[in-house]
Amino acid sequence: MYICNSSDLNIMAYEAGSKECRHLIEAKESLLSAMEALSNINSTDLLQIQIKEIYNKLEKMHDNRKKIESA
C-alpha cells in the first residue's frame, strides 16, 4: 500500500494512491529532509523559503492528482 499525504509540512497522513501520487510524496519528503538539514546551517533562510515554495507547488499538484483519482 502506498501513501498520499496531507498539506501539513510536518505530519504525513496516509492513504492509498497512484504511482504519480507516490512520486509526488517522495519528492515532498525529500524536500522536507532538505529543509531539516538546512535548518542546522547558518544563512540558509532564503534556500529554506525557496524549498518551501517548491513543496507547496508539489502539494497543489498532489491535491489535483487526488481529485482526478477520486473522480
Image: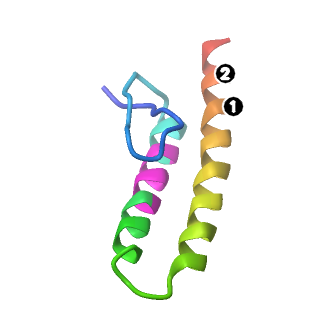
Q: Are marks 2 and 1 in contact (CB under 8 Å)?
A: yes
Magenta region, mostly helix, strand or loop? helix
Numbered marks: total: 2
Residue for point 48% across, 52% down: 28
Quarter where residue 32 is shown = bottom left
Q: Secondary structure at mark 2?
A: helix
On the rendered structure, is 51 left or right of 60?
left
User: Which residue in the protein does label 1 denote?
Assistant: 64
Q: Amino acid at mark 2?
A: Lys
Query: What stretch of residues is rendered in magenta?
Result: 24-31
Q: Residue furthest bottom?
A: 43
Quarter where residue 63 is shown = top right
CA gap, disc 2 to disc 1? 5 Å
Mark sitting on residue 17: none
Q: Against 61, is 54 above or below?
A: below
User: Which residue in the protein does label 2 denote?
Assistant: 67
Q: Nearer the viewer, residue 59 or 35?
A: 35
